[in-house]
Image (cartoon, grey):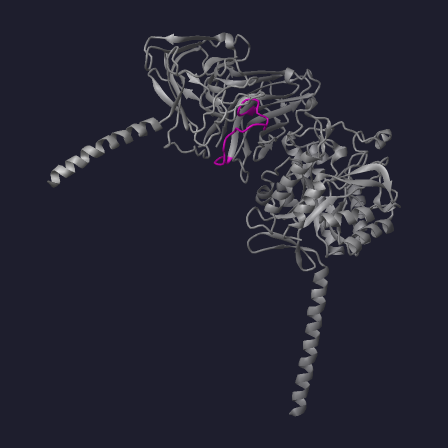
Amino acid sequence: MQKKFKLVIVITAILFVVMALFVFVRIKLLRHKVFVKKTKEGRYHLVVEGKPYFIKGVCYNPAPIGEGYDYDLGQDKCQPWLIDGKMMSEAGVNTIRLYKSSDNHNGLKKAIGDFYEKYGIRTALGHWLGFWEYPQPFYADPEFRERIKKEVLGMVKTYKDEKGILFWILGNENNYSFSGRVNPWVCPEADKAEVSEQANIRAKIYYSFVNEIACEIHKIDPNHPVVLGNGELGYLDVANKFCPDIDIVGILIYRGKTFGNIFNGLKSIFDKPLLLVEFGADSYNSFKKQEDQEMQSFFLEAQWKEIYKNSGFAKDGAGNCLGGFIFEWSDEWWKHNSDNSLNWEIHDTEAGWSQGAYYFDNKAEKNLNMNEEWFGIVGVSEEKESEVNKRLPRKAYYMLKKMWENSSSK
Amino acid sequence: MKKIMLLGLCLFLLPVWINAEEVKKEEVKVFGVYSNKRSPDNHYIPSGWMGDYGDIKINDEFSANPHSGANCIQFVYSAKKSNNQGWAGVYWQNPANNWGAKSGGFDLSGMTKLTFWARGAKGGEVIDKVIVGGIKGVYPDSDEIGMGPIVLTKEWQQYTVNLAEKNLSFISGGFGWVMNADSNAEGAEFYLDDIKYEADASIKPEVKGAEKMPFYVYLDRGSVSNHYIPSGWMGDYGDIKLDVGSLEDPYMGNTCIKTAYSGKGAQGARWAGIYWQNPANNWGEKPGGYDLSNAAKLTFWARGGKGGERIEEFKTGGLFGEYSDSDTASIGPVILTKDWKEYTIDLKGKDFSSIIGGFCWATNVDVNPEGATFYLDEIRYE
């Protein structure tokens, strides 16, 4: 009888230890898992290391003066992230967005690692999904799809175990190609359909493709969410049907001081958490023809307040916004007339496009008021420090620093 | 004895009561714009003639049937479009002809309403809008308040512009009216009298709620139900000919909108379009528009001149500026048929609480190499 009793105690103890071990391992695993949580009130949070994480991010492509669209961070021997990471960290930036991987995986891993280990800054890594390839992307072509899918999954396999990785961003305004006005692509199914249906057919094909990739990513890497990078809310009603497996909708939007109804708008067509993967304001006043740091700071402050107001941390608002990535950390001098490499050493003041919502300078000639080379919250100088163009923080940098210091969502 | 004392007390208090009444009367402050010809109460001058000013005649001592006093102001608007504008109006300014280049005007803080009396010669004359303030320039008015449209009757009627809690600290444009040739195709003769500001404490700020449905962008030429103006011409605007009173087989009513787009590329843009705006020419740089929160959809009827014309986009909202539209929605591309067909823009889940750009179309020469003639009718929110 006593023997039996002892056996029961031993078995119970073993079971207890196994269960404790299981719980411990699970907690440990969960701590490494980045995921989206929906509260019972319907508000969204990104959870990182078991805590809600509000993305105070910047888009990062620190092309030095004189370099162009083929700049590759992983191959940059000057390691600008060591300077930028420190400044970002001081301002409260907690995440960077990289648009693409690198030909030098080890170099990029080093950058991602340094950002995380030295400054606590995580990385969102993206893929264009072939959007800027020539000839134009053929999302209806099986061979093209297979090649792009292989590239993306290769990127995921390569970087998924880097501690600093936060999530993957697929595409960047690729939906603007559905109407055929930007990067049009051949699609026999759409071409033979009614004109009014052609864009929706392209949308269905593209979003199905993204969904296919998202499912594969989840199999390879269950620890990091997948973000769809979309231009405004265009065609997301189609994505709702054909891209249900993405975790977060990433929006690129330039609408001046307010994002309008996008937060509630997304809820009504595709109830996923919203992340502003690209937004911002330039610091060059095309009307006055001079740098205007006040103007940039004014718009960024208004935009950021609206992001916070609609986040899961706020009491009211839509509650679906996970944060945002300001476009961008530093000026890129190659962006205007990007095909002309002679221009890459000149800080162009000519505006490339028009957006009336940035109303301080939209009375400029032909209403052209958006200056691609002036979006940085830090400017860059031809003078160098540690072989890196000297960083010149703008008013917006200090405004954000102050705002983020006081933020309750650190 | 008590009765005598009570009577004495009443006699003692009577002057106090009378005086209080006088004070009460004095508290109702009035500031005149126009009362009678050469009245010292006239503080502004009807000097700011706008639009087709050649179509306007004024008689500021019209003596037949004034509302009060010896005379009133008679306006005759011929609607001949002498300056090709299709509209005309008059501002009462201080000093005369001050479009904001000079200091002047008055501090009217404390005034809560502007009232005026008006009648039409026949009845049915349409004033698009009456305006208080709104002069721009180096010395801009501190606010702009509008009211309208007003359909005049043959009898004198008093109209009120609510000014409660408006910033009237500097007003050089004391009063103005605007009318257009579409709403008054045969011209208009009308009369104004006793235009004045009043400090009436009982006036509360106007609460502008959501508009009732259906809400028309376009019903018929000159209809007072029309709420937006096709003033936002875009791209190759020189390629567009617009007739908002076309008699060519309207879908409903007397008229429809005929648009002829030549596709010649007058401005080199290779595309063109028109926004219906409120107020006219507002690209989002000033307040305006309507609260269309009650709208679930925008519907309109369209047909092509030949059939096969392609409109890239029909849109509502989407104007961005200091006063951006609260949302946007669109359909397109649309291939028009020769027969009238109804189209719908779904507004479910949208925030249409503030819409300056009430309707828009845009197309281009690539999809209409020979241009396009098309017709629109019954554009309305439901």
Image x and y of residue B324, in percent: 58, 32
Q: Quadrant of residue B100?
A: top right
Indicate whether A48 appears above or below A179. below
The part of the image, by quadrant, that contains residue A363 is: top right
What residue is at 25 percent from the left and 29 percent from the top? B18
| Position of B363 relative to A11 (above/below) | above
Q: Nearer the viewer, residue A31 or A346?
A: A346
- Judged from this view, the residue extending furthest toward the left is B1
- Is residue B14 visible to the viewer in this orientation of the structure? yes
Does the magenta-highlighted stretch encompass residue B10? Answer: no
Position in image of residue B54 (x %, y %): 51, 7
Q: How many marks?
A: 0
- The residue under the point 32% across, 13% down is B69
Residue B157 position in % (x across, y down): 35, 20
B102 sits left or right of A248 in the view? left
Give A186 or B40, whichever is nearer the viewer.
Answer: B40
Name the one closer to the observer, A24 or A51. A51
Please give the range of residues in magenta: B276-296
Image quarter of residue A335: top right
Tell me if I can see residue A243 in this picture: no
Question: Does residue B335 sit above or below A217 in this rendering?
Answer: above
- Is the stretch drawn in magenta largely helix, strand or loop? loop
